[in-house]
Amino acid sequence: MKKIYLAALTLAMTACVSNEDLNPVDNYGYIDVNVSNDPVMVTRAEVDVDDLSGWTITTTKNGESESKTWASTTAYEAGAYTVNAQNYASETAWKEDNENYGAAFYQGVTNVTVKAGETAPATINCGRAKNAKLTVTISDMPIAFSEVTLTAVRDANTNLIFTKGGNPSEAFFNATEKVTYSLSYKYNNSSKSITNQEITMKGAATDNVITITANDNGLISVTIKYDNSFGEGNSSTIKFDAATGEQVTNQ
């Protein structure tokens, strides 16, 4: 049986094993993984991921279909490999995180060649998030309006609730997913609602914003916009009649 030499690698930039510690005769080497990403929809600067323990990192040797989980103690037979890194194992995982409000999803891939007795650096630039964010902001309302709530549909069994000052105020969806939402509120203590509204996410790493505001006359507007730093999108406004509290349909 071939002897496989094990070495502890750092989870960031530097391997703890020198090439002199490896035996090239055994035809095995190592892969040192470094991952960077762009913090969620905030900046455009890449930053290194300090802790890879929560990431799913797999390696696939060229010509083979089966992927294997990367680990700091794994030695690899010499050859060409594809290394994939993502901060969640699946779409289901990132959507169910944070009590179903979700989280930013990052994924990247690189190719490396492992040489016998050497450590191959695998630098993976994930870039910006691969999914999209929905941000809901509910401003102060005239006294006649109260309990303003926006409900977004995650799936047939899950609704996401947003209220003024509530936490969280954001949720994550697929890059171009169409999200159905509704508004409920009280006007002079009478319950009212607007249903079957839709907003389509404008692409990966976009912050899609629904802002609910009111002017001095009691007119409430729901404005949907997209963060211009990620590319301008569409907008939509829902208006309410201040005298009746009903939606204005003849806009």
Image: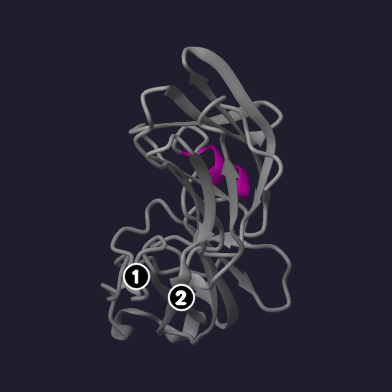
Q: Position of residue 116 (x, y in %)?
A: 48, 85
Residue drawn at point x = 59 percent, y = 20 percent? 192
Q: Based on the picture, tell me whether residue 89 belongs to the magenta stretch.
A: no
Residue 224 higher or lower than 65, as above or below:
above
Secondary structure of the residue carrying numbered label 1: loop
**Residue bearing the label numbered 2:** 124
Residue drawn at point x = 71 percent, y = 29 percent? 156
Residue 167 higher or lower than 204, as above or below:
above
**Residue bearing the label numbered 1:** 43
Which residues, given as a range, are shown in magenta? 91-97
Residue drawn at point x = 54 percent, y = 71 percent? 232
Q: Badge 1, how many Cα within 10 Å: few under 14, some, many 20+?
A: few
Q: Nearer the viewer, residue 3 or 140?
A: 140
Q: Position of residue 149 (x, y in %)?
A: 49, 28
Query: For the residues marked 1 and 2, what is the alpha-carbon distance in whole angstroms?
Result: 18 Å
Q: Based on the picture, tell me whether residue 94 belongs to the magenta stretch.
A: yes
Q: Position of residue 45 (x, y in %)?
A: 33, 76
Quick check: can you spot residue 126? no
